[in-house]
Structure formats: structure tokens, C-alpha cells
Amino acid sequence: MNKSNFNWLSVRQLSLLETMLAFALPSVIAFIGFRLLLPVLIDHGVPVIAGWPMVASGMLFLFVLAAIYLLKKEANSTGISFAARACLGKISGKEWFIYLVILMAGLLITMLLQKASIYLSKISLFQVPDYYPFFLNPQIDPAKAGMNQLSPGFPVQGEYWLIGLMGLTLILNILTEELYFRAWLLPKMSSLKQVSWILNGVLFAFYHTFQLWLLPQILPMSLIMAFVVYKSRSIWPAFAIHMIVNSLNVMGLISIVAS
């Protein structure tokens, strides 16, 4: 096999149970980190706006290492390059345009469904914990909220180290989601054919058990990103849109810190 080519069916396909476990394990780890470890840090005086990225970065770093290990191991066993197994193949300019349009449409749908997330977050079972940062609470509008809502008890003006911490967290988040959930897992589900990207998108959405109030927004984008990777056989378009969205989030934080 050419080292630059990757036939998705050439790797061992996961059973339905194995697929469920592959999504469930990081979900359980994330739930423990955000719902058990994070509140302990907050109770010990760590600011909410810093505690969340600290916990997230630690877990995501381990997820990225695991993804790289799994991808490299499978690349070696199938005789292809790491880049090929990681679904980092090049796509044409026409494909870039088509897939970015699809992804941008997904972002528009996500924005339109914000009210659904706000409604869900008001239900007791799905309420946002008070130890979660403002950017995960759809009820808080950063443009209108005061500093007490954005960062309770910890004024962030001039705290530029938060930008670096958040930037690191968002980069690790992109690498985890694209390398593990889509580059590694999706090809190993390809025996399911068209069902593979649908199942991948749904399970990825429910991986976010630690923030289910955002499910109305997460689910459609999860499905669209899985579809794009499935059709393009590349994570580059999904990676690019992820970078754009996360860059906007960092810019929003910069405006708050620099205000």
C-alpha cells in the first residue's frame, strides 16, 4: 500500500460495543474532571474562569497523546504514513470551498439553536453549574454581562496569562476532537457505511455529558463535521472551521481582559 494512501476499510473495524466504549471512556473521564475535580478547585479558591481551562487542558493533553499513539500504531501496522492514517490528506480547492460552505451553514444552524440551549439550561436537570465559566452558559450574553457574571470574585482585566491558558485549551480541544473522534474513530466505523458518520456525530454529541444543555447546538454541528470528514476523507476542513471558531472565542476573551 502506498504510504500516502489510506483505505479506511484496511484498519480493524470496531464492533458496536467497542464503538460505544471508545466514546464512553473519554466522556466518563471528562465528566469526572468537570463535575468532580473542577468544583473542588473552585472551592479551594481557584477562579472559575481559570479552573475550567486548567482541568480541561490536563485531560485534553492526555487525550491527544492517546490519539497520536493509536494513530501511529495503526499507521505502522498498515504500512502507511502517520499523516495518511491521521486523515491529513490534501483536498482540492473546489472541495475546500464546498466543505467550508457546508460547515459555515452548520455554524449558522448552531447560532439559530442558541435559544433551544437557553431553554434547556433552565430545566433543573440541565442547569449550568455555578462553577462553570460564562462562555458555557447560554443564558449569559458576554456583551451585556457585568464582570461579576463573567468572572465572579476575580476581575480579569490585565490578566493576560488567561489568554495563553485558554488558547492552549482550545488547541488541545481541536486536536482531541479531530485526531481521536474523527481521524481515529470514524475510519474504524466505516464498515457501517453511511450510518458511520451519523453514529459518530450522535455519539460525539453525547460525549459532552458534562454540558448536555448545549446539546441542541452541539448535535447538528457534530453531524455536519462527521459528514464532511467522511466525504472528504480529510480532517482539514473540520480542523480549519474549528480554528476559526476558537480564534473568535480567544478574541472575545482578549477584549474582556484588555477592557
Image (cartoon, rainbow, N blue to C red):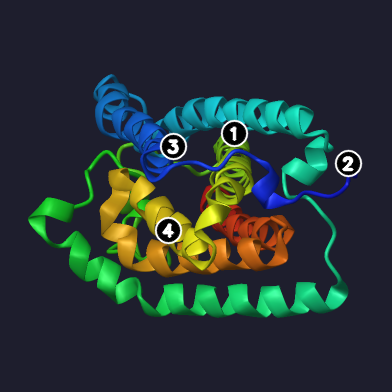
Residue under label 1, please give it: 161
| In the rendered image, the vertical position of residue 128 relative to residue 82, given as above or below | below
Q: Residue at x 43, y 29 (%)?
A: 55
Determine which of the numbered discs, if any, sits on residue 35 in the image: none
x, y percent for residue 16: 39, 45
Q: Residue at x 53, y 46 (%)?
A: 181
Residue under label 2, please give it: 3
Viewer-side residue, 81 vs 237: 81
Mark nearer the N terminus (1 vs 4): 1
For mark 4, give the secondary structure.
helix
Viewer-side residue, 232 vs 130: 232
x, y percent for residue 159: 54, 37
Q: Is residue 191 left or right of residue 24?
A: right
Residue 182 visible in the snapshot: yes
**CA distance separating discs 3 and 2:** 26 Å
Circle 2: residue type: Lys
